[in-house]
Image (cartoon, rainbow, N blue to C red):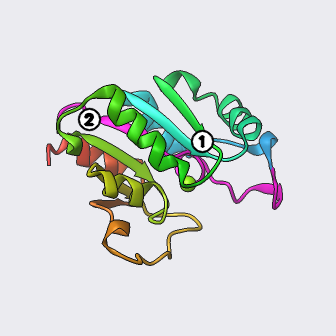
């Protein structure tokens, strides 16, 4: 696949949210990108967009703390989980990519970004690790096109031309 447009989820896709102070308080002092995610963001020349769900101030602080702002041409912060679908639609409207399969949605949740990506006909890649690893698909929209264990596998997938 040639230079697809990449849409990323943030929480548990680019860093591990399990290190936190309590249920509602991320541990900003210890917050780090997954090493393979960092390597991917640095080495991939594809255009990247971040679509994340959560409180705007908190998500902004995560982006700042992780130092990832410049990797993305656009960042969308959704205040409702389902708003991700609308963000994806906005991106489709804006980028006008005819081949929807040339847009990759990369995330850790089959019931969120994977589902919405599938509904819209984009290529979906499940990062199969972390706390949502054991979620079972409730219908075919929750089945990703690809499953990778880490970003090194994603690099290989992209390099392989599929
Ligand atoms: Mg996530």
Q: Residues within 10 Å of mark 1 (few under 14, many from 20)?
A: some
Residue 76: x %, y % from top left? 55, 34
Q: Residue at x 44, y 63 (%)?
A: 128
Judged from the image, the quadrant occupied by ligand 1 is bottom right
Which of pointers 1 and 2 lies earlier in the amino acid sequence?
A: 2
Q: Residue at x 57, y 43 (%)?
A: 52
**Magenta highlight on residue 18:** yes
Residue 161: x %, y % from top left? 14, 43
Q: Residue at x 47, y 44 (%)?
A: 86
Residue 155: x %, y % from top left? 31, 43
**Magenta highlight on residue 50:** no
- Judging from the image, what secondary structure is the residue with disc 1 in? loop
Residue 76 in view, yes or no = yes
Relative placement, left or right, of 139 versus 62 is left
Q: Which of the numbered marks, if any, corresponds to residue 85?
A: none
- Residue tagged by mark 1? 33
Q: Which residues are magenta?
A: 1-25
> Compared to 111, does 118 lie above or below?
above
Relative placement, left or right, of 132 versus 146 is right
- Residue tagged by mark 2? 4
> Compared to 124, does 62 lie above or below?
above
> 40 and 58: which one is in front?
58
> Compared to 140, does 39 lie above or below?
above
> 78 and 108: which one is in front?
78
Relative placement, left or right, of 5 versus 72 is left
């Amino acid at each position: 696949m040639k230079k697809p447009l990449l849409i990323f989820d943030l929480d548990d896709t680019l860093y591990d949210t399990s290190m936190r102070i309590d249920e509602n308080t991320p541990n900003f002092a210890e917050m780090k990108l997954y090493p393979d995610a960092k390597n991917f963001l640095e080495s991939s020349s594809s255009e990247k967009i971040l679509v994340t769900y959560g409180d705007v101030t908190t998500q902004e602080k995560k982006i700042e703390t992780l130092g990832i702002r410049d990797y993305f041409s656009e960042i969308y912060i959704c205040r409702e989980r389902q708003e991700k679908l609308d963000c994806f639609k906005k991106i489709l409207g804006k980028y006008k990519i005819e081949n929807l399969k040339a847009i990759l949605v990369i995330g850790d949740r089959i019931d969120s970004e994977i589902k919405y990506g599938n509904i819209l006909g984009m290529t979906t890649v499940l990062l199969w690790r972390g706390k949502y690893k054991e979620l079972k698909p409730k219908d075919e929209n929750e089945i990703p096109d690809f499953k990778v264990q880490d970003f090194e596998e994603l690099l290989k997938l992209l390099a392989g031309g599929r």
